Amino acid sequence: MESIIILIFVIGYLSITLEHPLKLDKTVPALIMAALIWAVLAIGFHAGWFDVIDTHEKAFNFLGGGEVAEEGFENTLLHHLGKTSEILIFLIGAMTIVEIIDLHRGFEVLKSAVKTKSKRKLLWIIGILAFILSAIIDNLTATIVLITLLRKLIPNRETRLWYAAMVVIAANAGGAWSPIGDVTTTMLWIAKKVTAGGLMEYVIIPSVVCFALPFLIASYMKPFRGYIETEELEEDAVSERLLSSKTMLFLGLGMIVSVPIFKTITHLPPYIGMMFALGIVWLVSEYIHPEEDFSKERKHLYSAHKALSRIEISSILFFLGILMAVAGLESLVYGVSAEGDPVGTLRYLAEVLQAAIPNQDVVVILLGIFSAIIDNVPLVAASIGMYDSPTDSVLWHFIAYSAGTGGSMLIIGSAAGVAAMGMEKIDFIWYLKKIAWLAFVGFIAGAGVFLLIERVIFAH
């Protein structure tokens, strides 16, 4: 009977990975998959077909435990919903802050940082902006912001495609070393698998290599030679509107960055810090607007209510579905460990993988490669359930690096890539031929540097 739940997950997962050929939003199969897995799990639990493992690694079934087992099942479901909700509330807060900044045209300030006509210099400026911004506002948002900027700077679409593709590499590399830079690193951070300081200590240098090496190679390629005409900063850049834009940009980014600091000081979960950050930005946004639009009739255009209406609720629901589906697999007792203890499906899978591929580094590198083919969120969610290594262990940092940067190898392999593909209509085959090898070189080089740091420097 356990095979039914696994089959539901496999079919749902395939539907998610084939969303483009099926023309079906991946949120739909994610939600259906999660509901069906827990429904079958509950029916089987009450019928005595399944044993369920609780948060304390203890297995129980309804026939043997009665009301106590029923309460345990409910507590297990509530526990997983609570852990999932921590991630969702955090993401909603971060996305709303970013939308408030955008409503106040804060990201237009970035145009002032681009004053070169050299294609090579522009490549590095855009790349560095993507690398830094993605660590603060996440790689998806950074990609959207910078491609919007590129549209204003590079009128030629063929040239712009190359820059947009390179932004994907830089954004994914930048998001991998920050607890707020990618959904996967946020998941690991909230699950207490990594700390903000530990993540930066282990992953920032490999991420820099993963970003810099492809950019170094690309800077000598034909598409990035010569000069282009860039638009000058508009006249209203010195107006009162730009002043309010700067205020909201720096306040919003500053409050997002303060979340890890808030967690370190208070020891509270990250979503509490994000709620505080959103409250401060929301408060200021109520009183700061462009001078010419400071009127009751136009005030709503800059309100947090407007920002909330612009966030992608479908993405939030996708994460809800996929994380709860993975939690269902984690709760289903599928076998026993080497010590004879009952283990969930994912932990059992980890032991099978360990037996088949004893080298854990190879497994993590393969996870990075697979994240280019299938969504990295469920892969990381599964790995959290598979391994029980301590906080800030090398394993978790390597997973953060591989899952975060491996998706750059295909245009559909990351949220940043999918965004770029949608905005600039980047062809899958074009990206595969022109960009995939650059992303692969960066990924492998960064992985090599990570392993070198782990074994040579941190070993001492």
Image (cartoon, helix red, strand yellow):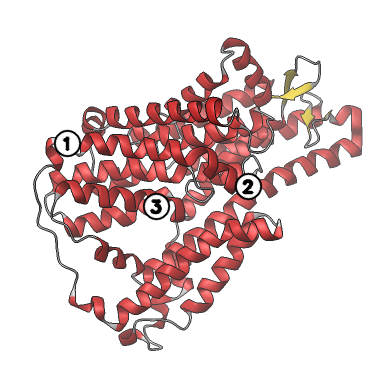
Q: Are marks 2 and 3 in contact (CB under 8 Å)?
A: no
Give coordinates of residue 180: x percent, y percent: 51, 51
Q: Quadrant of the C terminus?
A: top right
What secondary structure is marked by label 1? loop
Of the numbered discs 1 and 2, the one sitting upstream in the chain is: 2
Give coordinates of residue 101: x percent, y percent: 41, 68
Left or right relative to 89: residue 14: left
Left or right relative to 305: residue 321: right
**Dot 2 alpha-carbon crowd within 10 angstroms: few under 14, some 14 to 19, many 20 or more:** many
Of the numbered discs 2 and 3, the one sitting upstream in the chain is: 3
Work out whether 450 lies above or below 74: above
Give coordinates of residue 154: x percent, y percent: 15, 54
Work out whether 144 lies above or below 42: below
What is the residue that sits farthest to the bottom in this orientation?
A: 295
In the image, 308 versus 95, the foreground residue is 95
Left or right relative to 327: residue 231: left
Q: Which residue is mark 2?
A: 190
**Dot 3 alpha-carbon crowd within 10 angstroms: few under 14, some 14 to 19, many 20 or more:** many
What is the residue that sits farthest to the top in this orientation?
A: 356
Q: Amino acid at mark 3?
A: Ile
Give the mark toward the camera: 2 or 3.
3
Of the numbered discs 1 and 3, the one sitting upstream in the chain is: 3
Task: In the rendered structure, find residue 102 and report the number of the disc placed on it.
Answer: none
Q: Which residue is mark 1?
A: 220
Q: Residue at x 26, y 29 (%)?
A: 432
Q: Residue at x 68, y 30 (%)?
A: 389
Q: Residue at x 45, y 39 (%)?
A: 205
Q: Amino acid at mark 1?
A: Tyr
- Marks 1/2: CA–CA distance: 41 Å
Q: Which residue is mark 3?
A: 132
